[in-house]
Amino acid sequence: MSAHVLAEGSWDNTLRDSSKGVFHRCIDCTEIISNPICSECLGKQMKQMLGEIDPSLAEKIVTSNYAGDTHCIGCGSEMSLCAHCFSKDVYEQIKELNEVAAEEFLARFDYDLRVIYC
């Protein structure tokens, strides 16, 4: 049995080899990234939506993409922050500034945020 675990290309070795990263986890919540959209791509969509309601809020969104094993389905860049955590951070910022915009934000960028805030 131990020969199988240590064998070249075995499942156990594949899990341990970060270059083959079977599990891609968020650096904030440590959950597996199941919706791989980087903060840059998601931030563009958020800025566009918020710009329609309150242009000053759109300017406040700061995106910073952290490299990781997962690749964004929009632009292909490496990422390691899940859409839920990024959306939660943005929601908490805009909720204090404009509640109407925050409600619209939840409707469009939920990513399970309503479970926490509603």
Image: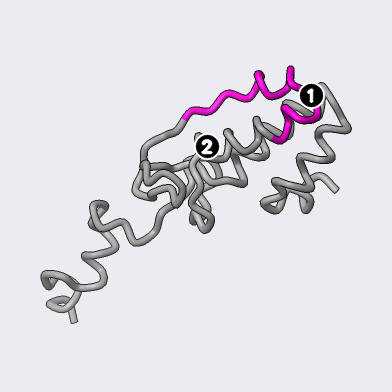
Which residue occupies 73% across, 31% down?
50
Mark 2 neighbour class, 10 Å CA radius: few under 14, some 14 to 19, many 20 or more:
many
Which residue occupies 37% across, 46% down?
76
Q: Say above or below: 15 vs 96.
A: below
State which quarter of the image contains the N terminus. Answer: bottom left
Q: Is residue 33 magenta?
A: no
Of discs 1 and 2, which sits in the foreground? Answer: 1
Q: Say above or below: 48 vs 33.
A: above
Quadrant of the image occupied by residue 93: top right
The chief SS type of the magenta part is helix
Q: Amino acid at mark 1?
A: Asp
| Residue named by callout 2 | 39
Q: Amino acid at mark 2?
A: Ser
Give the secondary structure at mark 2: helix
Q: Position of residue 69 (x, y in %)?
A: 34, 48
The one nearer the camera, 78 or 27, is 78
Residue span colored magenta: 49-64
Whether residues under marks 1 and 2 lie with C-beta atoms below 8 angstroms apart, the answer is no
Q: Position of residue 80 (x, y in %)?
A: 44, 43
| Residue named by callout 1 | 54
